[in-house]
Amino acid sequence: MAKFGLGALKNLLGGNKRRKHEVPSPVTREAPSPVTEQISTISEETPKISITPAAPIPRKVPDNAKKILFVCTGNIARSASAQYLAQSMVPSDSPWIFDSAGTGAVVGSSVASHIDKELDRRGVPYLGHQAKQINTRLLAESELVLVMERAHLDWIVQEWPQYRSKVRLLREMSRLREGAGRRSDPISYMKQHDSEPLAKDDIADPYRRGPKAAEKAVKEIEKSLEVIIAWLGH
């Protein structure tokens, strides 16, 4: 057993006595400021804001409306993007209205993956799109039918030969603009001008071919439309 001296024993007893009766001082915490509370509330309770694509604003169809129909295969990539890009390029009071359809449409489907990202990047509304099959009514009511590749033109002409004069490739019309007079009416010119599309007029189908193919297709469509819309006037 350890032995303690008298002084050590007193110190030990005195220390225990002090600890027994010692009252710890309260810990004071600084109250949060109203600003701190507000920031904390915002960070904990405010949901994150996510940006979603917008739906096209419905336009009142004017009495003098003239329709251009864009056509591809499934109506979810090339023709769909052409429709909404063209719509975004004209003012709300323009007589030109735009629609789209497919020769083998994925009926009811929305805009294809990667194509939607390209339209989002340009701020072009497209929500609510539902792919549809081309039919006699759509052809009859359209001033001009702009397709994406020669195969679409051939298929339409085989099914509806009476509408041959209305059907052109999108890039073909853009290319022919260079040879048209400054004052020429675009619809009359395209219906009366005798020419054959070139291989370079085709816009390749980007469906399920990744983001690069989608980017390339939309850029080609956009570039052609910039020429065509300016030619159409407002």
Image (tube, rainbow, N blue to C red):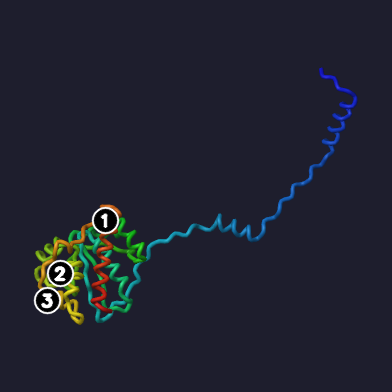
Residue that carries the numbered disc 1 in the rendered image: 213
Residue that carries the numbered disc 3 in the rendered image: 192
Report which quarter residue 164 is drawn in.
bottom left
Q: Which mark is residue 11?
A: none
The disc, 2 or 1, on the residue closer to the chain's N-terminal end is: 2
Is residue 137 visible in this depiction of the protein? no
Q: Which amino acid does the dot numbered 3 rest on?
A: Gln
Name the one closer to the observer, 47 or 233.
233
Q: Residue at x 11, y 65 (%)?
A: 159
Report which quarter residue 192 is drawn in.
bottom left
Find out whether the residues at labels 3 and 2 contact each other: C-beta distance under 8 Å. Answer: no
Name the one closer to the observer, 192 or 26.
192
Q: Residue at x 19, y 63 (%)?
A: 148
Residue that carries the numbered disc 2 in the rendered image: 167
Q: Residues within 10 Å of mark 2 (few under 14, many from 20)?
A: many
Find out whether the residues at labels 3 and 1 contact each other: C-beta distance under 8 Å. Answer: no
The disc, 3 or 2, on the residue closer to the chain's N-terminal end is: 2
Spatial CA distance of label 3 from label 2 is 11 Å
Q: Residue at x 29, y 68 (%)?
A: 85
